[in-house]
Amino acid sequence: MPSSPFVSAVLLAAGQSTRMGTGPRKPFLRVEGDTILAWALRSLAQARCVREVIVVASPDQVDEAREEASRAAESAGQPEGWVSAVVAGGSERTDSVHAGAQAVSNTAQVILVHDAARPLVQSARIEQVAERAREHGAALLAVRVSDTIKTSADGTQVSGTLDRSELWAAQTPQAFDARRFLKVLDQARQDGAIATDDAALFERYEGSVTLVEGDRDNIKITTDEDLVHAAAILRGRANQEANRGGARE
């Protein structure tokens, strides 16, 4: 059985949190006793293939992110240096991903890009995406679209209905062959290309990306309501773990 790939994870925590109102920026908001950044690092720590993490923070919060990442990694049982760097992000997502990717280890086989705003991803999904990327060059988590999707040119009248059987909602993590992804990012930088989805850049320059079906509890925290939802998921998981522990005793 082949060993797990050497995965360097780029954890994006540089967003401006414009939809969260006043208060701490999103990575430093607390849910069920810990920060969103800490929960995201804990999820990555549970995936055995993730050998290092590069955190990408807002330029004015690099020091704060470094302290929080160090604390979170230690609490997750990871050795010093597992969070190998904390770097400043850019004005666009693509700039932040490029900054993080430049700091990965030379021994990385797979670069895995994940949003800190999705702190509840399951470790099994991380490992599946990384393995598919090693096999096929690129992979991403996604879920089937369950709603009927309408299009509208003016925002008032429906102009079309899409076939939802072909629609998937992209999530993170998204993972890529390290050498090919670094080449993609360099080319995108030269071309001034930007994307809200890293797989879109790979599609543009390298080709197809493999789908890995994800979980609906891998939510993206963008609003206060999402924080409530995340807390409920975490409490549910804690209860399940307690019940399993009780059954073993």
Image (tube, rainbow, N blue to C red):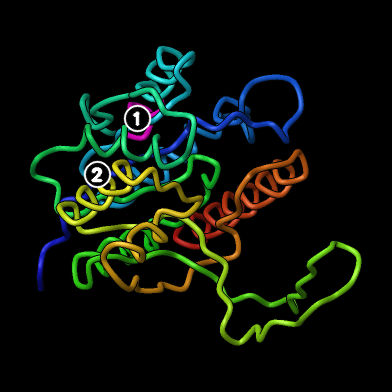
Indicate whether 156 appears above or below 99: below
Mark 1 vs mark 2: in front = 2
Is the stretch drawn in magenta largely helix, strand or loop? helix
Left or right: where 103 falls relative to 229: left
What stretch of residues is rendered in magenta? 72-77
Tell me, for residue 86, which label it has, or none: none
- Residue ID for mark 2: 186
In terms of image quadrants, where is residue 41?
top left
Image coordinates of residue 242 in percent, x first then y, are 55, 52
Image coordinates of residue 102 in percent, x first then y, are 22, 35
Residue 167 vs residue 115, the one in the foreground: 167
* Quadrant the N terminus occupies: bottom left
Left or right: where 114 falls relative to 216: left
Q: Amino acid at mark 2?
A: Asp
Q: Residues within 10 Å of mark 1 (few under 14, many from 20)?
A: many
In terms of image quadrants, where is residue 28?
top right
Q: Residue at x 39, y 36 (%)?
A: 95
Residue 178 visible in the displayed image: yes
Q: Residue at x 27, y 25 (%)?
A: 85
Image coordinates of residue 16 in percent, x first then y, are 60, 29
